Image: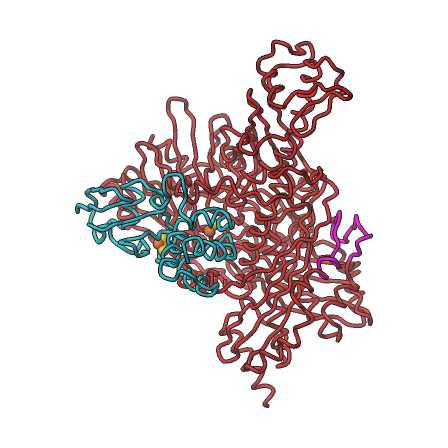
Amino acid sequence: MTTVSLNLNGKVVSADVPDNTLLVSFIRETMSLTGTHVGCDTSQCGACVVHVNGESVKSCTMLAAMADGADVTTIEGIADGDTMHPMQQAFHENHGLQCGYCTPGMVMSAIELVNKNSNPSEQEVREGLEGNICRCTGYHNIVKSVQAAAQNMGG
Amino acid sequence: MPDGQNANGIGSSVKRKEDFRFLTGQGRYTDDINRSGQTYAYMLRSNQAHAKISVDTTAAKSADGVVAIFTGDDMDVGSIPCGWQVDSTDGTPMREPAHPPLAKGVVRYVGDQIAVVIAESLQQAQDAAEMINVTYDSLPAMVDMRSALKGDTLVHSDLDSNVVYDWDIGDPDEIDAILASAHHVTEMDIRNNRLVPNPMETRAAIGDYDRAHDSYTLYTTSQNPHVIRLLMGAFVLSIPEHKLRVVAPDVGGGFGSKIYHYAEEAIVTWASQQVRRPVKWTSGRSEAFLSDAHGRDHITKAKLAMDADGNFLALKVETLANMGAYLSTFATAVPTYLYATLLAGVYTTPAIHCNVKAIFTNTVPVDAYRGAGRPEATYLLERLVDRAAREMGMSQTDIRRKNFIQPDAFPYQTPVALQYDSGDYGATLDSAMKMADVDGIEARRAESAKKGKYRGIGYSTYVEACGIAPSAVVGSLGARAGLFECAEVRVHPTGSVTIFTGSHSHGQGHETTFAQLVVERLGIDIDQIEISHGDTGNIPFGMGTYGSRSLAVGGEAIVRAMDKVIDKAKKIAAHIMEASEADVTFENGSFTVAGTDKSMAFGEVALAAYVPHNFPHEELEPGLDEKAFYDPTNFTYPGGTHICEVEIDPTTGVVEVVNFAAVDDVGRVINPMIVEGQIHGGLAQGIGQALLENCVYDENGQLVSGSYMDYTMPRADNMPNFKVGQQSTLCTHNTLGVKGCGEVGAIGSPPAVINAVVDALAELGVTDIEMPATPEKVWRAINDARAQAAE
Ligand code: FES
Ligand code: FES
């Protein structure tokens, strides 16, 4: 067992977990924040993306212990009360989600993408989201959402 | 029902009501649910394709945290049923083997369930599973359909053959005579590649037995909880409906793969009663590759006979369809009633014969995947027509227009059982050609040539049959269930409304689209409407969502239930306003008495129904809550034209989709934004099938493409921006005029892509390329063609 303490969506949390606990399990099971999803077992789908110290990370590829002391932000932590983050809002307005399963990871990856490139081209968005699989939308409206959000996030 | 003026009514791109919870991480999928005292199940699966097994669980049972371990010997229950009986033409009944949830003595595919380990934690269950001793006595694996057809080894030794059925539609002798005397016959061998559906949420199931009430709850990732209740309750576990509640909460995509009743659902439900604790199972992705029903997998020989002018005279089709090791719920209907009946396509071909042999193999069961049978039919037809045009020296559009069923020919009876109600195939072709800027193709081709690349354009003009469908018809075709839909419209005392629908939304946005129907009909605010689905404990009944049936069948049921509400409310309003019912009209949410200024709002009438002080008690019961079951008289027939343009780099063989235009006739559109989204998603799956996705077994029956490392899922940078348009004719047999939009993208697009690839490489002499047209295959085709030309 190991003690993991981290800042999760602005709140310091701490728990004793088995050494091999993945960050995604810590978030979903230990902390009961089920917005972060698991879509594969080969680190290829991006459903589990969260931010660790501001960088997007596939939380299925990281041990919870490695995030000890870090700031971790999940999909539950980006809205301002009931006001959604501009990226969430853009996905809503542009129909960038259907079943919603890839959505949390997609939104978290997209936020980082726009943070690094405030005015991405269509091609840059497509390449930037290459690590996130969506089976529902055909990506068309996801790309539109991210570009719209980039405008609203001050790009 | 006319397109209304209401901002949130029919025809408006209302933003989705369900988005907020999904965007903020508050969706509630099956794996998000945890029951108190819950245990965890791990399925030990076969690592061999075909073997006799003996299983020793003694050591594993005493491992840390283990609650119980069960094998097929312990689980003495019924067989997982197939929902559709398709017999051979000669009357031989469908060969239908027993399908125990846990294998009994023999495993028949890699992934077959051998044992379930139930433990305090998933880790402990997994660790204990490794201690189970399975002795495999290998049997030859039948992987390839042609060897299975020869039947050297039987997949089910208690059956006399690996052929499930040998089935025909049409008259073979008539067709052979036409083929023999026709001016030209175009022939092709066509493979429809095997696919893995891959919804992003893997399957999961929680069984929860309640000793106090001797009742069961199953939480499961299903597209149709009532169907699961029926199949599992009645056939497998013998639990009557009133003791079994099935909940399919938020579901992360289905595409067909979550229609079926799966072994794991029965295992966790049954086991929860054995161990008297909730049992939870969640599939891993690699496990999903080995246990979710796969899709497609046809091998076909087809011949199209034409006269000298290119008129189609006859079509002959022989198909081998892979069923995998057991018959999944819909499997037997897919290559027959959802495939062979569609072989007229959009054409007037007067004579058609199709023979289908469904084959058992030692692979995962194969069943419906988005489009189910109709993509296979469309791919075959549109590849054949493309080839025919080339052989006849005709243009791709001329050959199609010449053979189109004309707009004034509806209702049109095809020679293969279906009667199309409406369509205008020329109109969607015209629109799509404009959208795709077909006129500019030669200039663009020349541009590509300058860069040393090949460019091509491919057409697909298609029709499909969906909105499944009439119970009487499917019953006569061997369906063991009805295919109606049920809706309840519960008007609350203050006039707000809850709709209980038997349709299930797993991405389709029903909470919005169905609410728009209510806004339009009842004239109430969209925030006053809640759509409830997915729980047999709430919903009166339901047949679920697949075959693009939610709006055409489920939506229509809602409309009919609303009509009953309005009828009753009119009577109440007439009584209160002291008018005759005939003089009361309902419009924009108000009941008015003709020729007077008397009127009552919908909410006032609702209140009167629940506070019935002044109420026509002799005539009516209090309350305002109506239910309708709707069983359509026909399928619906969406159709359209997809035009794909590709550019191919001969140095790498990479095919880039540079332009994709789809103009579809889906009937009346309730929410254009949602419809376009459905079409985008379908197109991505169709383009994925054509260029990327392929499920491959080796000769021993090991799944080679068993993870995202080996199975190529479409990603954002593989897809183009789509050009999507609608050109609608209305369905003539439902009041909404709707046809369905969930599958058209996946049905129409694959042949458009491959036709474009063939068009690009036609100058090299390439005439065919098998799906998926991977860079390697395309590169080889180019180099082989060049080598041949050099000889
Ligand atoms: S769960 Fe698929 S990448 Fe993490
Ligand atoms: S919205 Fe369903 S997987 Fe992306």
Where is residue B626 shown, x and y percent of the image? 62, 24
Please tell me in which quadrant of the rendered image residue A130 appears.
bottom left
Q: Residue furthest left?
A: A2
Q: Is residue A62 left or right of residue B400?
A: left
Where is residue B16 shown, x and y percent of the image? 52, 42
Q: Which chain is cyan?
A: A
Where is residue B483 shown, x and y percent of the image? 63, 38
In this rendered view, identify the residue nearer to me: B354 or B431: B431
Is residue B161 magenta-colored?
Answer: no
Q: Residue furthest bottom?
A: B791
Please say if B317 is above or below B134: below
Q: Can see residue B88?
A: yes
Quadrant including the C terminus of chain B: bottom right
Please say if B551 is above or below B780: above
In this rendered view, identify the residue nearer to me: B316 or B758: B758
Instruction: Give the image's coloring scheme.
Output: by chain
Where is residue B425 shown, x and y percent of the image? 74, 57
Please tell me in which quadrant of the rendered image residue B186 appears.
bottom right
Q: Can see residue B106?
A: no
Q: Which residues are magenta?
A: B405-430
Q: Which chain is red?
A: B
Residue in the image at 74% along x and 72% along y: B395
Please say if B37 is above or below A30: above
Residue in the image at 24% along x and 53% along y: A63
Q: Is residue A62 left or right of residue B632?
A: left
